Image (tube, coloured by chain):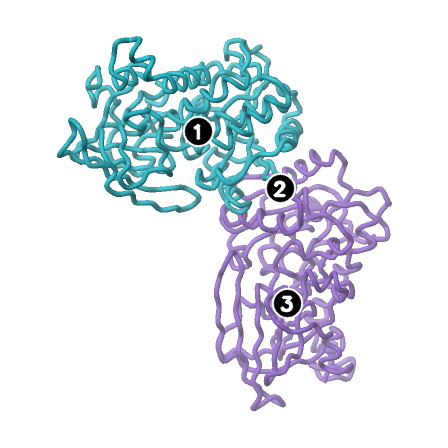
Chain colours: A cyan, B purple
Amino acid sequence: MREIGLNDIEDIALGATLLGAGGGGDPYIGKLTAMAAVRECGPVRLIGADELPDDAFVVPSASMGAPTILTEKGVGAHEFHRLFDMVGMFFNRPVYATMPAEAGGVNSMLPIACAARLGIPMVDADGMGRAFPELQMATFAIGGASASPMAFIDEKGNAGVLSTVTNKWTEDIARAATTTCGGTLTIALYCMDAPTVKAYGVHGIVTRSQKLGHAIRTAKEGAAAAGMTPEEYFLHFTGGFKLFKGKIADVLRETRGAFNFGRAVLEGIGEYRGSRAFVDFQNENLQCVVDGEVRATVPDLICLVDPETFIPVPTDALKYGKRVLAVGLTCFDMWRTPRGLDLVGPRYFGIDVDYVPVEELCGQKGE
Amino acid sequence: MREIGLNDIEDIALGATLLGAGGGGDPYIGKLTAMAAVRECGPVRLIGADELPDDAFVVPSASMGAPTILTEKGVGAHEFHRLFDMVGMFFNRPVYATMPAEAGGVNSMLPIACAARLGIPMVDADGMGRAFPELQMATFAIGGASASPMAFIDEKGNAGVLSTVTNKWTEDIARAATTTCGGTLTIALYCMDAPTVKAYGVHGIVTRSQKLGHAIRTAKEGAAAAGMTPEEYFLHFTGGFKLFKGKIADVLRETRGAFNFGRAVLEGIGEYRGSRAFVDFQNENLQCVVDGEVRATVPDLICLVDPETFIPVPTDALKYGKRVLAVGLTCFDMWRTPRGLDLVGPRYFGIDVDYVPVEELCGQKGE
């Protein structure tokens, strides 16, 4: 157990942007929401999944909606109370803790606000180890956990509980409600017992986010202290594989069914001069192809960062002329099982390739 | 209190088709559902609204969706149980009775099935006195009742409870869920106390439906016994105003946002030869215009019936060459108040005329 105070939030948000793999929503508004909650209600107790009593009932909290819309809206204080009241009514059990459903992007921040407002701990684990666009894409689902009964509320006060026959139906009905309510809902889903969190959660992901954020923020000093170039240092502390370095030559975008689809086309710079690459995305980056060869696909994380500062560049910020370093991070190992790949493999996203782990595509040492 | 058995259902359904004013959904599948429930579980106790104990908690049941899709689906036995369990969980009160939210169309039948399955009485009242396309259009709303918390379930088992800030938000979110779930949901809404039912319900509407159905079915004998022509007899027992008689020359249709929109163009026959009329509809008939003059608008009921058999012709059955008698029935008087007209007046449906009661437009005696 440790406490998350105001000073921790900045680094967690920065690390979560990297784990967002281009998506997950801009943590900026989420950060303000989390900071306001901690300032008002005090620091949040962060507990390891293994510290949960076995009979603890854990309710992950999140925001649902298109990232470009998320940035225009916030989450009010009373919403978490009503959300958890609805969950409590359905399960008739006291909630022991909340946790992120998704550690990447804005959903790293909402559970901090939720935990602070409700005075409950937050578990240092999530159900993705990154960000994904649909809510059936959770490690808990590999363990057979149900996304529903799921509660939702919008900023106007419209709320509901869904109980569906599959997690994909939860996604579909909640997505329709999201669109109807103006693009964003605050949700509580995958309500579960501690053993499921322990067996299927991505342990330590909040702490990992914070360490990633800290390392990005102090990359220059860190590199100097380690006797590395900043890029070497960045690849070292993220455990990332270098995929490409280039200048954005074109960005194609389409908002369809509440998702941001698109492709960024890159022209190589530095050692990649003369090469071309593209990165496809659906909220998050899905695949990176360099000179016609696949270098990384979902569920591995494809992160575009500024080549000097290593600040992650989300898909909504991609624009002509911007320089980016493309890095691949290995995903949580359960995503690489057949059940995991059914949920989040390349073919689910319409990319007709077999999944090959990024470390095999790039060689064990990256570059 | 009286009982509704198998023999009553046919006439209630036929009368409900007339009260559907062209919409409300084909009662045919609803009739089979109600009959199967009564056959299996026994007759339904029909109680007058005034017979309700003041502390009785009443939960109307209905089907939501586009009429053309409703005819392809049924409602299973267990759905009402889950639906009312969800309502019970939200309100933590035993349900005393169900009732129709909408007496016109298929929604005349579902509460019979619901009451039979759950072994509770059905109240002889509804919240429309006819059919309307959106769920905020209920007399209970004039009395300040809330459509939500509203429960829904689809035939696959997907279910939910909505609690919204306005009845229009209930409509919008439930409509999105309806579309996502394949076009039809079974719902429980306007859960309320007996005093609200007594003050704002349309009393005796089930009995009225049954009498209308019986009179239509026996029109020829009834007319002979009364010494009237069948048409005179039909206008007499419905209290209707003759608007037009004609042959359908054209039908324009559009399915948009889960509603059936359209216009039927009529060429006069009999005493209307040389005249032209049109009837606009959104699920239900909205206005009847004869030779450029408005003869009736919502919330009054505009019913097209076969000129020989007086069987109602729903909007989905309108087709070139069909002969119809257009009749206007006066609506429940609360619809004629300013609050009523805000909910269901012609302007709500995009028809830019002031509401004038059908008896004023047609003269007190119809012709």
Give, as a three-letter code, the residue at label 3: Arg
Q: Nearer the viewer, residue B92 or A53?
A: A53
Check disc 3 and report the residue beneath it: B347
Residue A158 is marked as 2
Residue B100 is marked as none
Between the residue at mark 2 and the residue at mark 1, the CA separation in whole angstroms equals 24 Å
Measuring from the top left, give residue A93's x and y in whole percent: 65, 21
Q: Where's the C terminus of chain A, which quadrant?
A: top left
- Name the subunit of mark 1: A
Q: Secondary structure at mark 2?
A: loop
Q: Are marks 1 and 3 in contact (CB under 8 Å)?
A: no
Q: Earlier in the sequence, mark 2 or mark 1?
A: 1
Q: Residue at x 60, y 64 (%)?
A: B23
- Name the subunit of mark 2: A
What crowding class fits label 3: few (fewer than 14 Cα within 10 Å), some (14-19), or many (20 or more)? Answer: some
Picture layout, residue B259 above or below residue B288:
above
